[in-house]
Structure formats: C-alpha cells, structure tokens
Image: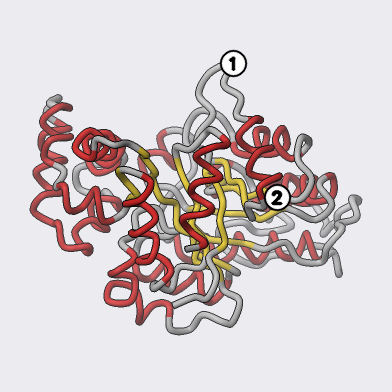
Amino acid sequence: MVNHLNLGINLGYWTRGPEDHTAAVVAADELGYDYVFTAEAYGSDAFSTLAWYGARTKRIKLGTAVAQIPARTPTATAMHALTIDGLSGGRMVLGLGASGPQVAEGWYGNPFPKPLARTREYVDIVRQVIAREEPVTSAGPHYPLPLPGGTGLGKPLKSIALPVRPRIPVFLGAEGPKNVALSTEIADGWLPLFVDPQQVETVFGEFLAGRSAGFEIAATVSVIVSDDLDAALTRAKIPLAFYIGGMGHKSTNFHLDLIGRLGFADAAVAVQEKFLAGDRAGAIAAVPDELADSIALLGPIDRIAERMQLWRDSPVTTVLFSGVRDESTLRALMEAARG
C-alpha cells in the first residue's frame, strides 16, 4: 500500500494527422499531474510526440510507455532520451519494452529470441551513454560495441552532447514474471499494461520482492466516465479483445498469457479464437465483465472515486489514466484519486 498515488496520463499511439492532445497535456501539467506518457508499436514513434508535448509544458514528466527495444539501437535510444531530457530541463522518463516476435521480426527486422538478455544489455548501454563517464563499450552478443569485423575502424565513443543528468529513470514494460523481476533488478520502475490492483501481490509479489525503495509501479488504467456502466464495460472490452486476440501469434501472445495469470485463461482462449476467426464482435462479447471492470475505472465518477481505493491499497505507486482528454475529467479524476 502507498500513502500517495502519483498521477499521469497515457496518450498511447499517435495515429493520424490532426490528432493533437496538447490541450489535455497542458491541463494535466497545470493541474499538477506527475506524468504524460506516449507509446509506439508499428506506426508513429513515441519520441516525436513526447518532444511536441514537452515543448508546450513546464513541469510534467515526459515518458515513453513504451519505446520499442527492437526499433533502434541502444545508443540511438539514449540519444533521443538525453536530447528530450536536456531540452525539457530533466523531465524525461525512458520506458522500454521488448515488444513481441511478430513486431520485432516482422516490422523492425530484428531478432526476438532471448529478450531478457537483450533488454539487460540494452539498458546497460543506455546507462553508459547517459552517464558519460567513459567511451561506451559492450562485450555482449546482441549489441557489441565497437562492432566486431566490418572495416575494423570502429572505436569506443563518448557522447558529444552533455546530459543534464547523469541518470535518466528507466522503466520497463513487462508482463511475464521473469521480465517483471528483471525490472526490479536493472530499472527504476515497472510499466504494467493490464493490472488488477487486488492481484498485484498474489500474481507478481514474489517477482517484485527485490525492488528497491523508490521503485515505481506505473500502471496504465483505461478510464471511461459514463452513467451507463454497461456501455462503459463494452467500450473497455474493445482494446482487451484486440490485445488478447490480435497483438501476438496464436502460439505466442504475452497479453493472453497475462490474462490467464489473472484468472481468465479459458475466456482469453475463447477471445483469441473468435478474433482470429474474424469474429471481432464475438471476441469483444467474450471478454468477461469482471475482467474489464477489474483492470479499468468505469462508470459514474462517484463509482470511480470509490474504486480508486483499490489502487491506493495496492503496491501501485502511479496510475496513468488512458482515454482521458478533457480538463474537467482530469480534474475530477485527480479529486477522486486524492480521496
């Protein structure tokens, strides 16, 4: 249990030309929200939108949830992070994720095997770049620096840009138990996507046991404020059906596995089968009400305020509201979170 919940908004992916959530981000900044996060998968990138919003705000922390590890080399990611951190006066939070084999290999053209070892090596190089204590080197098999072979002219280099901080917080997006445990070992925080506050300890407690003081658990939580709870539940099921059914291969889907660990294994398989068969409406309907309600904040604002107690009673330190774009709702959610 935490004494005080940090609050943020997760804007997700940027998907089309005129889509600009500056008004919401500025409102969150002025209201005292702690974070704004952006995301990427296989369309828009997370850093461009983050820089856009960072230039229009003053104090809110700027995070990626998540930047894809296979999308760019660790030194390139570190360059993005130290640039935004410098321009924003030290507000950057670098959220990283290994993605999955379909995206890593199908979109980025990079291998997916051994994601834990790859992540460990990646974070180490990012830390070296930001610390700027000495030229960056890595003897690891995934991102060796300097590159063996080639012209033979490569040499260890130190960033010519001067970071404003020797350490930028790194959070890991993780769903599997081993990856969650890795986040407590090498990162400053964990970014869970689908989390039931009442099951954090039972499902992940042993893997979070090694976390240090100050370790953040920043959970993205879908919010739908509506007097019609049934309609809100239906809307909340749409992204769940997509992630369970379509964000991964039939044989390798980390989201489906996570939903199983939350106690809905059979339902998750049913959702996936309907989704892959082209029955999107059936997949949405197959998502249990209990599941959708447990990992989201749905219904009238009074109900949401009441259910915020579940998050205050959990190990989660930060709630990142997803789907909220207007100042009045942001204000109401802040009041609800503060109890």
Query: x, y (%) of residue 259?
Result: 23, 56
- Residue 134 location, quadrant: bottom right
Apparent side of residue 244 relative to residue 214 in the rendered image (left or right): left
Residue on which the image places disc 1 = 18
Name the residue rendered at 54%, 37% in the picture: 328
The reply to whether residue 64 is in sight is: yes
Quadrant (top left/top right/bottom left/bottom right) for the N terminus: bottom left
Regarding mark 2 in the picture, which secondary structure is present there? loop
| Crowd band around label 2 with a 10 angstrom C-alpha radius: few (<14), some (14–19), many (20+) | many
Apparent side of residue 121 relative to residue 41 in the rendered image (left or right): right
- Are the residues tagged 1 and 2 within 8 Å (C-beta)? no
Query: x, y (%) of residue 63?
Result: 63, 50
Query: x, y (%) of residue 222?
Result: 38, 45
The image's mark for residue 60 is 2
Name the residue rendered at 22%, 33% in the picture: 231
Q: Is residue 111 above or below residue 56?
A: below
Q: Is residue 124 above or below residue 54?
A: below
Query: Looking at the picture, which amino acid does disc 2 mark?
Result: Ile
Q: Nearer the viewer, residue 194 or 46?
A: 194
